[in-house]
Amino acid sequence: MASRRIEDLHPDLQPLAQTFQRRCADAGVDVLIYCTWRSGQEQDELYAQGRSKPGPRVTNARAGQSAHNFTIQGRPAARAFDAVPLVGGKPMWDASHPHWQVMGKIGADLGLNWYGRPSAPFREFPHFELAKGYQ
Ligand SMILES: [Zn+2]
């Protein structure tokens, strides 16, 4: 099972994720960070979904290619987290719900690459990634 621990994020991303959650809460948007780090094996299982296994395709990245697989000296240090707004305590997966735009703007204001923006390399609304400038 993939991690949702803030501690499994890149050291530069941890404080940004905490600020992100706080600013979203201040804006009245309850947010669940449901994925931080995942192992290469978990990544490959996810990649197989919609290809050799049933289900919708959810990623184009194989093991080691996703920002979620990043490590520093063998320790989890994900360069991205996946977040979903909670509405009435339940995940709101419909990306047309206005809370997604609030979340996206707050992430962008923090300098994160939000993959729900129209200019993203591919659209993946829950995905917030550390900008390239960080080592
Ligand atoms: Zn992601």
Image: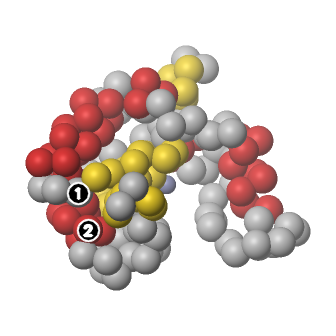
Q: Is residue 111 visible?
A: no
Residue 104: give x, y in percent of width and height.
25, 63
SS at badge 2: helix
Residue 106: give x, y in percent of width and height.
17, 56
**Horizontal arrangement in the rendering, residue 20 relative to residue 76 (left or right):** left
The residue type indicated by label 2 comes to: His
Residue position for label 2: 99
Residue at the image point whose x is 34% and y is 82% from the top: 96
Disc 1: residue Cβ within 8 A of ligand 1's nearest atom: no
Q: Residues within 10 Å of mark 2 (few under 14, many from 20)?
A: many
Residue at the image point whose x is 83% and y is 72% from the top: 54
Q: Residues within 10 Å of mark 1 (few under 14, many from 20)?
A: many
Instruction: Kindly indicate the quadrant of the structure image that contains residue 98.
Output: bottom left
- Is the image coloured rainbow, by chain, by secondary structure, or in one colour? secondary structure
Residue position for label 1: 29
Q: Is residue 134 above or below residue 51?
A: above
The residue type indicated by label 1 comes to: Val
